[in-house]
Image (cartoon, rainbow, N blue to C red):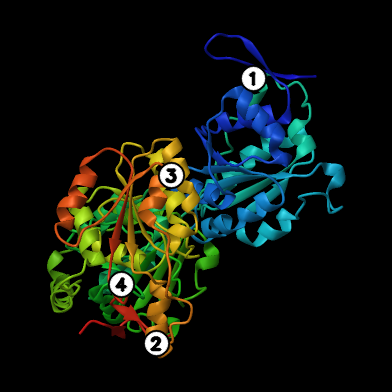
Amino acid sequence: MLARREAKETGEVQELSTGSDVLLEMLKQQNVELIFGYPGGAVLPLYDAVYRQSFNNILVRHEQGAVHAAEGYAKATGKTGVVFVTSGPGATNAVTGIADAMLDSIPLVVFTGQVGCDAIGKDAFQEVDILSMTAPITKQNYQVHDVNSLPATIVEAFTVAISGRPGPVVIDLPKDVASGLPDDFESKQLNVWKKQPVQQKRVVDEGMMLKIREALFKAKKPLILAGGGVIAANAIPELRRFAHRFDLPVVSTLISLGVMPDTDSLFLGMGGMHGSYQANMAFYECDFLLNIGSRFDDRLATNASKFAPHACVAHIDIDDSELGKVITTEFSVAADARDALQWLLTNTEKRPKEEHNMWLQQLNDWEKLHPKHYEEEMGSIKPQAVIEEVGKLTNNDATIVTDVGQHQMWVAQHYPFKRPHQIITSGGLGTMGFGLPAAIGAKLAVPEKEVVLFVGDGGIQMTVEELDVIREYDLNIKIVILNNKTLGMVRQWQDLFYEKRRSQTIFNGQPDFIKLAQAYGIKSLKLPLLHWRETLADVFAKKESAVVEADIPAFEQVYPMIAPGQPNQAMMGVD
């Protein structure tokens, strides 16, 4: 029997003739506005339903680009990104993006096509065991064998993706299920699935929170580490109120830049391998460290055994598997960041600000001793200067997307972030090629915001085909290629730790990026050595996409830098 649904506008009854139609209806019930996808044989029924229902599919040019674009959409909004890819190579091409989302806790639901149920396990054309491949890099994965179970599976997948610590979920969809005839789902029955089950929130452990409060009262040098969990929990207002109520300095991770405005006197910048001097010295000197929503990854806690050696450490995280995994903590609380901060705000009286004056003065002295800086160089355009100029041209309010490498760290250091969801970057996996498709997803997510992509000459070539998506959908994205003709970060490590043996990190030949962008129908130009600021201002004054190439010094270094295995206070390049 054919499924049916009533059209809201006319009251007409439309046929839901296949499992694919039911799938799209369920996506609408989950308030999904668009998906990122690429068709193929195993998902022909799904794309036929997309055509018949005029569902908004963003046609990317590669499946990896589809997942990165969905990540950009999710990072810019906090919503769940949705992806359609076909079986076999379509699914395997998506694996990198799925792993990237897992490490950065990004909610995605990825639908992978699959051969028919009877052919599974028989090495059919374009068959892969995507469930086994993605088991370690998803929160959950499913293979649907009965079209009638699709609604429940989809609702559960969206609930899993966004609840607790967010992350990616895969739904493997055999072709015969996608084209199968479901039972008679009336619209009222489908609406039952619209209401997701209430997420079970963790109850804040008040006993442990009281101990954290007591440790805070005793501290003379307190410090907050605010991670991505603060943004995921929408806890920015609570964090800022808490920090200012008690004069608590705050350090961010890479992906949580924007939790405090760059101009806030209590914000010390990003910590870790390329973090600010005062942030890393604060880790070393603090006597109480409150980590809210960060997993203490090795780029932040560069030597776990010597991290925050003088501190009583408290850790609040929604994922209890992260508690005590890297750093031994005195107080651990498995809780949503917002719930924990609200408890502290409600149950902690205001303290005199004078108690932390000496600590705050020490932090200010460190900032004055080693402020973020770079050496000007006659006859060259410095990447840090370009990033700072873009900050001025965008009133520090653009959504900033980066690829991975030196430019990523320069952006983290020199763009003055001031709000959450403002930096879109690949943190845990460090995926080159992430930037261009992620910028597309971010622009489609928040079209009213200026979107700027900073990318290197290596990363742009990994997903350059997605320029065609910018052209097709007429997206106003400014793309700044910082071209040093090298794989800059790897080359920097070779110079510092391998006696300058620059093996395979120098590009002896490159495409003409200006002509390449023009071939995709996008205006492009190279910044002139003289008057480059005026040229850049003219580009940003126009409401249209553009590729801007800036030739930068080939051997510019990212400093400060902490060598592998060294503690946070052992920073290079600060003298």
Q: Amino acid at mark 3?
A: Tyr
Q: Amino acid at mark 1?
A: Lys
Q: Looking at the image, is mark 4 or mark 2 nearer the viewer?
A: 2
Q: Secondary structure at mark 4?
A: loop
Q: Looking at the image, is mark 4 or mark 3 nearer the viewer?
A: 3
Mark found first going from the N terminus, 2 or 1: 1
Q: Are marks 4 and 1 in contact (CB under 8 Å)?
A: no
Image point (26%, 65%), residue name:
383
Q: Are marks 4 and 3 in contact (CB under 8 Å)?
A: no
**Position of 250 relative to 261 (above/below):** below
Image point (35%, 53%), residue name:
514
Q: Looking at the image, is mark 1 or mark 3 nearer the viewer?
A: 3
Alpha-carbon span between mark 1 and mark 3: 46 Å
Q: Which residue is mark 1?
A: 188
Q: Is residue 338 visible?
A: no
Q: Which mark is residue 500?
A: 2
Alpha-carbon span between mark 4 and mark 1: 54 Å
Q: In which quadrant will I find the N terminus?
A: top right
Q: Which corner quadrant of the image does residue 217 belong to?
A: bottom left
Q: Which residue is mark 3?
A: 520
Mark found first going from the N terminus, 1 or 3: 1
* In this picture, residue 100 sits left or right of residue 555: right
Image point (75%, 54%), residue name:
128
Q: Looking at the image, is mark 4 or mark 1 nearer the viewer?
A: 4
**Position of 509 relative to 559 (above/below):** above
Q: Which residue is mark 4?
A: 275
